[in-house]
Amino acid sequence: MVYNKRRVVIVALIFASAWSWMAFVYFTITFHNQERPSELQNTPAWANTTPIVLMAPVKNQTEINDTDDLDINETLHQLIDFKDLGRNKRAVLLLIIVTTAPARFERRQAIRETWWKHCSGNQAQVECVFMTDGFITDGIQRNLILKEKNKYKDIKLQPLKGGRGQFGFRFLNQIKWAAAKFNFQYLLRIDDDYFLCPKRLLFELPLRPKQNLVWGFFHCQAGITWLDEAFMIFSEDIIQKFLGQNESSMLCHPHADQQVMLWLSSILNKTYFHDTRLHHQPPASHVPRFSNISNVCDSHLGAHGAYGKTMYYLGLRANDNAKDVSAIPDFARFCKTTKFDYRVFNPMWKYEPQPCKDNPTWNLGDEMWFGKEVGQGL
């Protein structure tokens, strides 16, 4: 009898203890859930829809760099918007957009210390901006680009996550932003490894066609022609025609130059200016004469593939100023056709255009395109 009573007491104590623990857990969870909504009410709406692509990989606390202190919301806050400024748009002769990858700080710095200096102090003529991808998965790199942006005030962040398959979308974002924020007469889209003679270009622009102008380095192969995306100048009306396409049928391509040629195919009146003063290939850094050339802007308007020391060397020996202006040569003397067909490209460059509205990726991944500096794409 005593044994049975003792057993009942023990069971009762165990039951009471279990019940107390369950009650504690229940009230703790309930209290936490009641507190959570008040926290969310103070959070901006856009912060609750953060794209997954912005999230940095989870790291151990010991692996976090000291620069990893700017949060994802700060990135979203600094992305470009496409709101039209209307009458508040700034009027410029030329808008220069330099396409650059987030990790290319050295290239941007080389430009800042050379031809970029001609972008300041001439407010009515030129505006220069770097434009890069803002959806950066690496937390350290994301914070570095934000700090660089806040320091130099010359970087714009696109709502894109990077990779080879994004070049066409980058260009589309760039011209949407440009048309919304500026009244420009000409737009130059240029790579971050391109040495430019901006003073020579600014002197020459008023003497060039005000409409229907497509200017750069063209390729002429396999019965087609196309404009290389490393340097592309368009008059304002061409940009407006690009943006005026039907959104349901507008085609995008992973490579901006092919995308541009697809869009140009539907524009009847256009002047193609193939400029032989643009050195295109091999990369200038791989050409011995660019390591000892003097007064490079006397003979060139720009040079592609100016990496590292070459960019600085050309900057010191530019002699960039007004030059004689020749007439635009007849394009037919360079290439017998103005037609374009993406289907003739070899497999490395051949991708079927897709409707832009579908946000195609072409399964090309998110890795940075290194380019000809390391022999990629040759």
Image: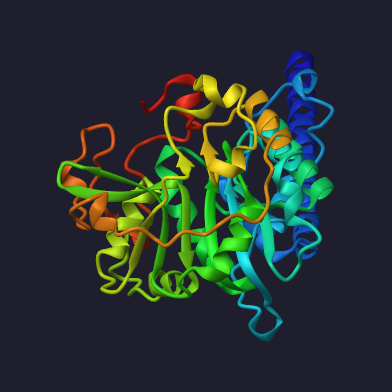
- Direction bottom: furthest residue: 87
Q: How many marks?
A: 0
Q: Nearer the viewer, residue 290 or 352?
A: 290
Quarter-wise, where is residue 94 in the image? bottom right
Q: Is residue 139 visible?
A: no
* Residue 333 rendering spot, x and y as whole percentages: 25, 52
Residue at (32, 66) in percent of width and height: 250
* Residue 81 rendering spot, x and y as whole percentages: 62, 66
Quarter-wise, where is residue 241 in the image? bottom left
Q: Nearer the viewer, residue 319 or 280?
A: 319
Q: Is the residue 188 above or below the residue 87 in the image?
A: above
Q: Nearer the viewer, residue 150 or 21?
A: 150
Q: Is residue 184 visible?
A: yes
Residue at (64, 33) in percent of width and height: 104
Q: Taking 362 as reference, is 44 left or right? A: right
Q: Is the residue 214 above or below the residue 217 in the image?
A: below
* Residue 371 rendering spot, x and y as whole percentages: 46, 29
Q: Taking 19 as reference, is 343 left or right? A: left
Residue at (66, 79) in percent of width and height: 85
Which part of the image, by quadrant, shows the C terminus?
top left
Residue at (48, 75) in percent of width and height: 210
* Residue 113 rendering spot, x and y as whole percentages: 76, 39
Which part of the image, by quadrant, shows the N terminus?
top right
